[in-house]
Image (tube, grey):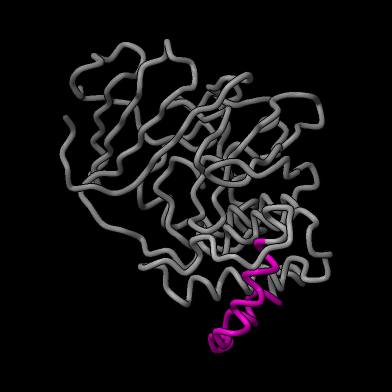
């Protein structure tokens, strides 16, 4: 790990800071993320949000740029590192099915859903060729970089960002199922898949956020209703990937590109796809 990750690991191992320190750091973060000086409480310590979670956010502020003047916006790198801390501290969740929903901003596109059981069986609804009213058996497997993966494969991925990037680079490749950036072994889309739709464990999602934070082409473009909007610019011009990340929950709320079930690139360069994921015991319907 680089010096930043070593420092982060050291601070996370320390006892939880006092409430006063958390309040001060929380205020600084709000000033920078919202672009104005304020100490109003904006839902940080709401019922159900633990002091440990707030401490994690405070640690992220200290690590990622406490010297930034109040009122200046947080960088894309800071947003991703804050999300990495949140991901690492988020419980895995439980359920019989990994449930994914996609809602395109184009009103002509139907809502898409999929359910993947722990045994690998999968159902979908609203995807191309599917009935819009009922879930149907779908043979498409979970895919990463054009390669079929299962829950065990995802569990075995490294929890270190550099090791994770190296492991992704080692995956066998099918050029027809990859974007140009992945063919160059940039692995940006594979990292985004790990934080967006795939049922990767918390520590792997955290490593993926940290790996993305090392990329110089990541920029924060502003605060929106449900998170921080980031732009990941491809040096060759495409795809220009936009993400809306909520650093408090480590969730990717919206993106303009996703990896399709066959590993190819799907998206809307002029719009967004809202994404919701999680474990559920509710069967496909």
Relative image position of residue 223 (x, y in whole percent): 65, 44
Q: Residue at x 39, y 36 (%)?
A: 142
Of residue 241 and residue 154, the one placed in the foreground of this image is: 241
Magenta stretch, overall SS: helix
Where the C terminus falls, by quadrant?
A: top left
* 268 is within the stretch colored magenta: no
Where the N terminus falls, by quadrant?
A: bottom right
Relative image position of residue 93 (x, y in whole percent): 31, 58
Residue 280 visible (yes or no)? yes
Of residue 234 and residue 28, the one placed in the foreground of this image is: 28
Q: Is residue 9 above or below residue 190?
A: below
Q: Quadrant of residue 62?
A: bottom right
Q: Residue at x 65, y 40 (%)?
A: 188
Residue 194 visible (yes or no)? no
Q: Is residue 79 above or below residue 272?
A: below
In this rendering, would 243 be left or right of 90?
Answer: right
Q: Residue at x 49, y 28 (%)?
A: 273
- Counting every numbered tag in the picture gives 0
Relative image position of residue 149 (x, y in whole percent): 41, 41
Q: Residue at x 56, y 27 (%)?
A: 174
In this rendering, would 19 be left or right of 31?
Answer: left
Question: Where are the magenta residues, as a range?
Answer: 7-30
Of residue 234 and residue 24, the one placed in the foreground of this image is: 24
* 9 is within the stretch colored magenta: yes
């Amino acid at each position: 790990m680089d010096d930043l990750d070593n420092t982060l690991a050291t601070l996370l191992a320390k006892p939880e800071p006092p409430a006063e320190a958390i309040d001060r750091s929380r205020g600084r973060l709000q000033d920078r993320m919202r672009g104005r000086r304020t100490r109003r409480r904006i839902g940080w310590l709401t019922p159900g949000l633990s002091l440990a979670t707030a401490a994690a956010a405070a640690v992220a502020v200290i690590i990622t740029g406490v010297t930034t003047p109040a009122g200046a916006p947080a960088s894309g790198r800071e947003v991703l590192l804050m999300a990495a801390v949140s991901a690492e501290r988020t419980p895995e969740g439980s359920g019989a099915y990994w449930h994914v929903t996609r809602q395109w901003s184009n009103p002509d596109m139907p809502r898409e859903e999929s359910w993947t059981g722990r045994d690998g069986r999968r159902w979908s609804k609203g995807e191309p060729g599917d009935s819009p009213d009922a879930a149907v058996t779908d043979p498409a497997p979970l895919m990463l970089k054009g390669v079929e993966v299962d829950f065990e494969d995802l569990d075995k991925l490294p929890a270190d960002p550099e090791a994770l990037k190296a492991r992704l680079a080692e995956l066998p490749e099918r050029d027809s199922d990859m974007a140009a950036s992945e063919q160059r072994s940039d692995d940006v889309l594979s990292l985004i898949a790990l934080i967006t739709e795939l049922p990767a464990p918390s520590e792997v999602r955290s490593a993926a956020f940290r790996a993305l934070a090392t990329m110089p082409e990541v920029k924060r473009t502003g605060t929106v209703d449900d998170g921080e909007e980031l732009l990941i610019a491809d040096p060759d011009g495409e795809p220009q990937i936009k993400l809306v990340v909520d650093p408090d929950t480590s969730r990717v709320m919206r993106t303009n590109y996703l990896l399709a079930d066959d590993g190819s690139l799907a998206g809307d360069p002029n719009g967004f796809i809202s994404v919701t994921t999680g474990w559920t015991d509710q069967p496909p319907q």
